[in-house]
Amino acid sequence: MTRMLRPTLIIIFLVSLYAPSARAQTGTYYVATTGSNTTGSGSSAAPWATITHAVNTVPDGSLVLVRAGTYNGDVRLDRVFAQGITVRSETPYQARLRHSAAVVRSYYGRNITLEGFDIAHSPGAGPLVIQIQDLLGSQPGCADGNCVSGLTLRDNIIHDSADNDLLKINNGADRITVVGNLFYNQAGSDEHIDINSVTNVTVQDNVFFNTRDLDTSSFIVIKDSNGSDDANLGSRDISVRRNVFLNWQGSSGSAFVLIGEDGQPFFEAIGVTIENNLMIGNSGDELRAAFGVKGGQDVVFRNNTVVGDLPSLAYAFRINREGSNPVNSNIRFYNNIWSDSTGTMGAGSSGGNDFSDGAASEVTGLVLSRNLYWNGGQAIPAGDQVNPNTADATRVVADPLLSGQGGLVLPTWNGTAFASGNPRIRDEFVRLVALYGTPGANSPALNAADPAQAPGDDILGNTRSTPDLGALELNPANLTERLYLTLLRR
């Protein structure tokens, strides 16, 4: 007789998959609000007072545990390590980092992980919550290895900027990983993440949303603002994968993810992959489109799920030239789900339905192949730039059997737990995927993707076999995952 796994065991199993990775440590050191940089030794009994002092003091390979409390002042990650160190909140999200300017910055550091913190501006603070940029002066693409690189932000709550971006990665930084974090509430005409004139950046397993409408810009922008002022001309080799975007509150001229922005006479981003993301259109605020490109080359948008009314001026994407941009080149869409069950796909405040925006002359090498389209039983609207009803010869037009967004609980943090009652970011991530990104058991999305264009995993990091359309793979081999998703949807 087969025994059904209990929900508690399933949750424990899934959480264990995403626990902080274990590695050999040279030693463990401590920081506390009661510590001292003068008389402390970094031991458990005599901790230091600041993360900056710990980073500047510990040997390579160390683990720095930061005890609960509020730490006011800037945190500088400006030391080079060969093996790398980890700076971790001892209790997840209970070490709170606050400052009246950039809270965390790395201009000279290498191979440092910052993990498990609650990071936000103090009221009235100056620009940027976190900034990672290279001031070492590297060669293009950090070819000489002499640049800010190997920085990882993992499992942090990064929120409530008083001025500008939540996270800016710019000016020649290389090999930056942003994984498993929660982002909300940038300020002004700025972003959650500004990826700007850098190389080899991975943004993965994060949750992005807002709780206030201040006419802000895209959640993620990938671009090059400063041209030849640093070593790079255009951001290159950028991956945005396995993320959840929801609750748009911002400018009607922006997108969840935008490539290019500044009208430069060169490609602002080259070699960008957007895959396995869930984009939930649950808000009443109007987007320009879920995805945008203006000055991009060699961009792949595949196995993403865009679901809900949004609403937006164009539902799927806008590809256009801004300022002096060259014609966008090789923008390809494979195995995606675009599903608006309300039948108003791409109907913004001005009325009308629109799948995509932009002139045909603004892009070469535009490909639509093997995507699923659903507009609540209404016709799929033709786009100004490309008509999916004719351009996508292997299209699927059918209901993917995704749940609606009624009663959606935002993943807001109250200091001790999320609004849903979950204790960790990963729990919230899986909850959102289960409720809003999981096709029904008889969905036409199942086993329907082009395997030659599908990534090897899905939004939860599980292996794809006969790949499904969209972000989530309902693989029969992933029994534990399927049981958990079923339980959450009830």
Image: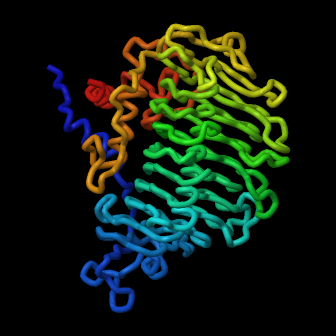
- What quarter of the picture does the C terminus occupy? top left
Of residues 22 and 131, which is closer to you in this image?
A: 131
Depth check: give the residue in front, 181 or 419.
419
Colouring chosen for the image of the structure:
rainbow
Q: Using the image as rendered, state which of residue 449 and residue 284 is in the foreground.
A: 284
| Relative side of 339 to 6, left or right | right
Residue 221 drawn at (x, y percent) = 63, 46
Left or right: 333 in relation to 66: right
Rendered image quadrant of residue 363: top right
Specify the quadrant of the image occupied by residue 373: top right
The x, y position of residue 65, in whole percent, is 34, 70
Residue drawn at (36%, 65%), measured in percent from left and top? 96
In this view, 303 is above or below 12: above
Q: Give the quadrant of the N terminus.
A: top left
Q: Does the rendering let one see residue 445?
A: yes
Instruction: Give the tally of numbered discs.
Output: 0
Residue at 67%, 54% in the rendered image: 196
**Does residue 206 appear in this view?**
no
Residue 431: where, in percent of width, then height?
A: 34, 35
Compared to 154, does 123 lie above or below?
A: below
226 displayed left or right of 316: right
**Residue lying at 34% horizontally and 66% vertically, measured from the top left:** 95
Of all residues shown, which one is farthest toward the front?
350
Q: Which is nearer the eye, 254 or 154?
A: 254
**Residue at left offset 58%, top offset 50%:** 191
* Extreme-bottom residue of the structure: 39
